[in-house]
């Protein structure tokens, strides 16, 4: 993926990377180190936070990566770079140390932390958001549940995962389009229509039909003109009613997603891919490449050429297209819109369709690495220790709206964001709606509200945050710890976008809240007898408020000022 190249507010890790890169080049110019030979690969400068904080704030293994191409001991290389860092990095680092077998360990100065805090405060809502000189144009397709019933808590996980991923990618400077693909034709829509027709006539729902209160409501809401069209001579009632009902259900789905705070830029129907000729053009493109053949009356794609275990049917022997036919048409249609990268978010039960679609994309001349599928693991919803079972056709399901009624949007978003998308987990409804420290989203929101309360209390005492952070840390290790945690936000966003996952964001929010609570416990923030110290401390806790607000905003979670 394209990495961010600049930041709306500074990343300490990025600053360390630039400083080491500069010192390395300076060591080459001074003759302390030779350049990397032309026939060797020039290593990238990697900077991480040491697992042991006593080793410093930042660490790099560059010297060990240079040892082979430079044919020098890594300790000697590290010392040469460290010497340049001590003289050329100004007051960025309080210390620069070399540790065996060749690590560079750097400790940031108070001045560097204070400058970064000033820039973060100036960035305000932009703090934590990154920019890129070459942003990817990414299409993310998610949810895409068939319009045969309300969104259940079983298929709603894709809504959370997709929306959160889009938010993270956008925060990292990428150009993201949110897309919903719906099947508005085929057997399932006809089964829905048959169910509506049966109830409208007062008959039992067919065995392969759909049940539930929503189907009864659809049956009672059928407009007279639609019913007349469905029951006219020669009409295919199931198709007519299915088409009408699917539109109504789609509107229900849209309303649920809007309540969750999920929006889509594009709604694409399967029927349109056939009607607009995308499927036929894709098949012809495969045929021209020699990847299509006819057998047993059907049309096949030679998927085995690309490592699949068997070839795949595009058109059945009766001429009807398969779902795969629409899939390959959809790939060409998406790339025709100028996207650099396609991301599909599917349930884990769709893993078997990935290979054939990537193979078809490659056969049509597209880079298969630009076709990506993220599989979403199963989630069990548990209430009072008992799993909530769901079946759309049986009508024994809990909808997304039911979940939001039970736990609220904020808790629902947090619990899904805090798990890797591919990991199955149990969603404890009781824990999610608890208003206590046992509920992590409540814990983080409370930290934000507490800071707002502190700021209000200070204002009443006539004390405002310091206008600059310069000189406010003053060797205070507790304050330094909070400052470092605040300033990690740009790195957290960068890492989340690179991993295409959000559980690191919730972990950061929880960690920041914990560090703030510790700071508030150990330092008196508002002291009318010492307004100068109070102003400095208020500025720092206000920076923590800013970071918490932006982090929760990234997750689509509210930031209450009172709780």
Image (cartoon, rainbow, N blue to C red):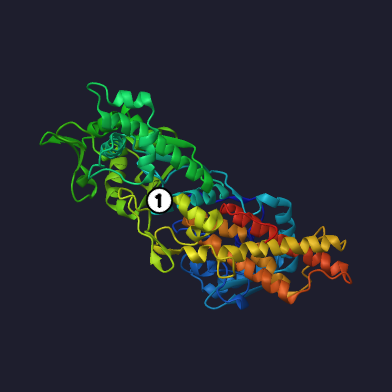
Q: Residue at x 35, y 46 (%)?
A: 212
Q: Is residue 216 above or below residue 54?
A: above
Side (left or right) of 47 relative to 246: right
Q: Quadrant of residue 444?
A: bottom right
Could you say where residue 274 lies in the image, as x and y percent from the top left? Answer: 31, 29
- Bin the neighbour count of mark 1 within 10 Å (Cα to Cα): few under 14, some 14-19, many 20 and up: many
Side (left or right) of 421 relative to 493: left
Q: How many badges with numbers are in the image?
A: 1
Q: Quadrant of residue 99?
A: bottom right
Q: Is residue 419 above or below residue 193?
A: below
Could you say where residue 70 lies in the image, as x and y percent from the top left? Answer: 50, 66
> Can you identify the residue that label 1 sits on?
152
Front residue of 442/274: it is 442
Q: Quadrant of residue 97?
A: bottom right
Task: Name the residue at the top extreme.
Answer: 233
Q: Residue at x 49, y 48 (%)?
A: 163
Task: Name the residue at the right extreme.
Answer: 529
Q: Is residue 11 above or below residue 313?
A: below
Front residue of 498/328: it is 328
Task: Name the residue at the front extreme.
Answer: 202
Could you say where residue 55 lies in the image, as x and y percent from the top left? Answer: 61, 76
Front residue of 250/86: it is 250
Q: Residue at x 64, y 59 (%)?
A: 548
Could you say where residue 248 lies in the image, as x and y percent from the top left? Answer: 41, 35
Secondary structure at badge 1 equals: loop
């Amino acid at each position: 993926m394209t990495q961010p190249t600049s930041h709306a507010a500074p990343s300490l890790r990025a600053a360390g990377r630039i400083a080491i890169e500069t010192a390395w080049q300076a060591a080459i110019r001074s003759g302390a180190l030779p350049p990397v030979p032309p026939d060797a690969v020039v290593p990238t400068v990697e900077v991480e936070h040491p697992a042991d904080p006593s080793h410093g704030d930042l660490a790099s293994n560059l010297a060990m990566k240079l040892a082979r191409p430079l044919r020098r001991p890594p300790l000697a290389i590290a010392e040469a770079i460290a010497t340049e860092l001590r003289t050329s990095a100004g007051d960025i680092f309080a210390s620069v140390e070399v540790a065996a077998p060749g690590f560079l360990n750097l400790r940031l100065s108070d001045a560097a932390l204070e400058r970064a805090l000033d820039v973060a405060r100036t960035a305000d809502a932009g703090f934590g958001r990154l920019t890129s000189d070459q942003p990817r144009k990414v299409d993310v397709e998610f949810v895409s549940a068939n319009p045969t019933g309300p969104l259940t808590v079983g298929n709603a996980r894709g809504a959370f995962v997709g929306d959160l991923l889009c938010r993270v990618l956008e925060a990292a400077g990428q150009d993201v389009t949110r897309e919903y693909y719906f099947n508005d034709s085929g057997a399932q829509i006809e089964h829905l229509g048959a169910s509506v027709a049966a109830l409208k006539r007062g008959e039992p729902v067919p065995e392969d039909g759909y049940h539930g209160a929503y189907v009864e409501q659809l049956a009672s809401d059928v407009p007279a003109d639609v019913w007349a069209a469905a029951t006219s001579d020669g009409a295919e009632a199931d198709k007519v009613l299915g088409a009408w009902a699917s539109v109504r259900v789609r509107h229900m789905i849209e309303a649920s997603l809007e309540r969750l705070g999920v929006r889509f830029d594009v709604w694409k129907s399967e029927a349109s891919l056939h009607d607009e000729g995308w499927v036929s053009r894709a098949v012809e493109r495969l045929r021209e490449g020699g990847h299509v053949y006819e057998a047993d009356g059907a049309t096949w794609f030679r998927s085995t050429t690309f490592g699949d275990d068997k070839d795949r049917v595009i058109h059945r022997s009766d001429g009807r297209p398969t779902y795969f036919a629409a899939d390959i048409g959809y790939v060409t249609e998406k790339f025709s819109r100028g996207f650099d990268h396609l991301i599909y978010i599917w349930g884990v039960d769709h893993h078997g369709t990935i290979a054939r679609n990537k193979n078809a994309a490659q056969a049509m001349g597209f880079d298969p690495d630009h076709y990506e599928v993220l599989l979403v693991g199963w989630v069990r919803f548990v209430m009072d220790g008992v799993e909530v079972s769901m079946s759309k056709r049986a009508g024994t399901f809990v909808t997304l709206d039911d979940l939001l009624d039970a736990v609220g949007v904020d808790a629902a978003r947090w619990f899904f964001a805090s798990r890797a998308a591919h990991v199955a987990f149990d969603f404890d409804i009781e824990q999610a709606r608890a208003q206590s420290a046992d509920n992590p989203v409540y814990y983080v929101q409370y930290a934000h509200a507490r800071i707002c309360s502190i700021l209000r209390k200070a204002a009443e005492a006539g004390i405002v945050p310091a206008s600059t952070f310069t000189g406010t840390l003053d060797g205070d290790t507790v304050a330094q710890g909070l400052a470092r945690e605040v300033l990690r936000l740009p790195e957290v966003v960068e890492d989340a976008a690179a991993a295409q996952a959000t559980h690191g964001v919730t972990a950061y929010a929880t960690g920041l809240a914990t560090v703030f609570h510790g700071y508030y416990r150990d330092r008196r923030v508002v002291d009318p007898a010492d307004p100068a110290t109070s102003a400095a401390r208020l500025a720092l806790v206000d920076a923590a408020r800013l970071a918490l607000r932006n982090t929760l905003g990234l997750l689509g979670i509210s930031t209450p000022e009172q709780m």
